[in-house]
Every structure is written in C-alpha cells, then in structure tokens.
Amino acid sequence: MRLTTRILPLIGLLGLTLAGCSKQQDAVRIGHVAPISGNQAHLGKDNENGAKMAVDELNAKGITLGGKKVKFEVLFEDDAADPKQGTAAAQKLVDANVAGVIGHLNSGTTIPASKIYNDAGIPQISPSATNPKYTQQGFKGAFRVVANDAQLGGALGRYAVEKLQAKKIAVIDDRSAYGQGVAEEFAKGATRAGGVEIVAQEYTTDKATDFTAILTKIKAKNPDVVFFGGMDAVAGPMLKQMKQLGLNVKFMGGDGACTEALAKLAGDALADDQVVCAEAGGVEEANKADLDNFRAAYKQKFGQDVQLYAPYVYDAVMTMAEAMIKADSADPAKYLPVLATIQRKGVTGNIAFDDKGDIRDGTLTLYTFRGGKRTQLAVTK
C-alpha cells in the first residue's frame, strides 16, 4: 500500500476533527435541568420547551460575541426531581464546560446543585425554585426569576384569612424543600393575619398516592381550609380522596399545584372555586399582551398549552444571553457582573435582581378553577 493512501484518510479525519473543534468554539453551551422522568415530567418538558423557544429565537438573530458569530446550544439533563440525581446532573454540566445553567425546577434539587455550580464559577438562574434558602447561601451566581416562598406562601396565608374567612386551617406538606418551605410560609402568613387556628399539620411524600389516614385525621378537626405544600401530581389524587371522604372544604396550594394539569389529575373531584392557588409570577394588565403572545407562539410551536414555568425559562435564557451580549463574552467571569445588574423587560414582567439574586418586586398570580379550567383571580405583590 502506498504511504499516501494510508495518510490521506488520516488527514481527512484530522480535518473533520478540527472542523468539529472550530464548531465547538463557536457554540455557547447552556445547561438546563428539570425532571423529565417521574410524576413531574409534564412540568419538566414544559420547561425544556421554554428553553428551546428562547434558543431558537437567539440563533435566528445571528448573535456575535467577541467578534465571532455564535450558536447557542442547550444541554438538557433530567434530575427526576431527586436531589442526588440533581447533583449528578449538575456535575455533568460542569464537566461539559457550560457557560451557564437554567434550572433546576424544584427547590430540593436546585439548592444542592447550586453549590456545585458556584464552586465551578458557573452562573445559574432558576425559573421556578422558590425556597428562600436558595439565594441565602451567599452565592454570587445564583438567581431566580420568580417570587420566593416567603412572598407566595405569605400571600396565600393572608388570602385564606382575609378573603376566605378561614378560622381553622389544616396544613399538609410533602417534606420536600419546596413543599415544606411554602407550607411553613403559608402558616406564618395566616397566623400573622390573625384570628385563625392551625388545627392540623400533616406530612406525606412527593410520590405518595394514599392519603386516607391523614385526611381522616384532618376531617375530624373540621377545618375551613386544607393547604397542601407540594406538586400537582400529588395534589390531584389528594383532591379525589378528599371528595371520597366527604371533606368538602377549600383547598389551597402553591405554584407546584397551580397547573393546567391539576384539573385532569383531580378529575370530577375538582369543584368550581374549590381550589385557590398561586403562581410565583404573573403580569399586570399593562404587560398581559406579551405573555399572551408567548402562550400563543408556544402552542403553535409545540401543539399544546403552557403548563406553568415555560415563560419563566424563556425569560431566564433570554436574560442570561442578554448579559453575554452586553459583556460581549460567554465567559462567566465576564458576563456575571452584567447579569447581576441587568434590567430587562421579559414576557413575565420586568427582570432585575437584588443583591441576593432574588427577583425585584416579584409578582404573584392567584388562580381558581372553573369548569375544569384555571381561572385568574388577581395579580398581587
């Protein structure tokens, strides 16, 4: 065999390898983590879709950083809403040398993963983690684009007392960082409003399906309101079992239970105006058109309605990208200071962060369900 015959394929392979390196150098990799397996997969997929919408729009603009045209890519990881899997996903993204991370969905995965990103100097924006502890760790690169549990739980607690005239309240949480946190803040908010008694505090898990024992105990206390700190996959079956037991009282929950999917999960157990829940975000009337346009575009692209957090994921990606554009670099050390002081108008409202990384002037949207459809009650702060 002639030497050139042996060398030419190697040269061709080397050329392909170098071309791949060149492509990688022009790529800006952003990590995204959410549960895309398990009982919260519908919410995780919703988040993924929000990230895809943002990246598709960014790439259509032909963005240049440092004099070079770049392509944004998202590396999607599944944490299954499990803290151990969440930290493994975080380390995988760090090893992939991502420029930033959008996620995680749950507080219970966001908080432990945040230390891994912080140690690696990688900025993180959570579109949905509401436990206050996330931004109380002193990590310069930790941000969120939604209100936290102190705001959300407190507002729901006040609503229970002031609007629903509750005198006796039972509280259940799923023992996750999110569920426990929002339940505690709800109880504080209700107690501060005055004239109410917390008659029961019960616990379950984020994978439980049988609540007969705790609901039977609660029924004996004759509450006016049952508050659940947890996700829709548990809230739906819980509502069914409340109906079976004749526990026909108001049911309240945080953003994890406040999804379009709740009606399907609860079935005919969901009575009109029975549920009052809050989404950790929302826009006032002046900005409503932007969010409506996003929802319409989302449905056209994916053939389904927004579940919950997709608009916040979209805004988180766009906010991170804008910081890179203003810094003219995807290097975390260069764009992080810009991200910390950024001010931009998103589809979910104005985005600016305080010195902890919390969204400034975070809004909340209160909802109920009528005719199996989520119906807005009010936007508040």
Image (cartoon, rainbow, N blue to C red):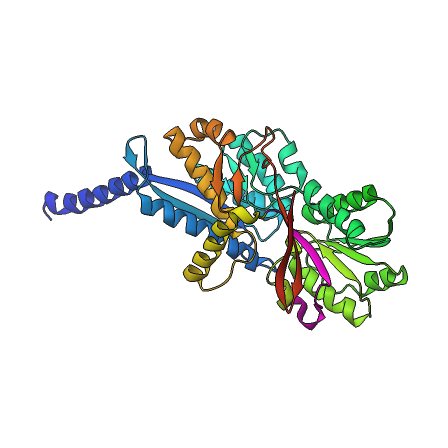
Nearer to us in this view, 214 or 11: 214
Taking 219 as reference, is 136 left or right? left
Q: Is residue 47 magenta?
A: no
The quarter of the picture where residue 246 lies is bottom right
Furthest residue toward front:
286
Note whether 119 is above or below 174 in the view shown.
above
Question: Can residue 49 be seen?
Answer: no
Q: Name the residue located 34 percent from the left edge and 46 percent from the top edge.
A: 59
Q: Residue at x 44, y 42 (%)?
A: 318
**Of 43 and 243, the residue lying toward us:** 243
Membership of 267 in magenta stretch: yes
- Determine the residue positioned at 68% across, 47% down: 178
x, y (%) of residue 4?
11, 44
Q: Residue at x 57, y 47 (%)?
A: 284
Image height of 148 relative to 217, above or below: above
Tell which residue pokes out farthest to the right in this image: 220
Q: Which residues are magenta?
A: 265-281
Image coordinates for residue 54, horizontal then vertical, percent: 42, 48
The quarter of the rendered structure image containing the C terminus is: top right
Image coords of residue 146 (percent x, y): 59, 43
Toward which corner of the image does residue 367 lie, by quadrant? bottom right
Q: Is residue 204 visible?
A: yes
Above-or-below relation of 334 to 293 = above
Picture coordinates of residue 248, whole percent (x, y) = 80, 67
User: In the shown orientation, is residue 183 left or right of residue 221?
Assistant: left
- Which residue is more in the foreground, 232 or 348? 348
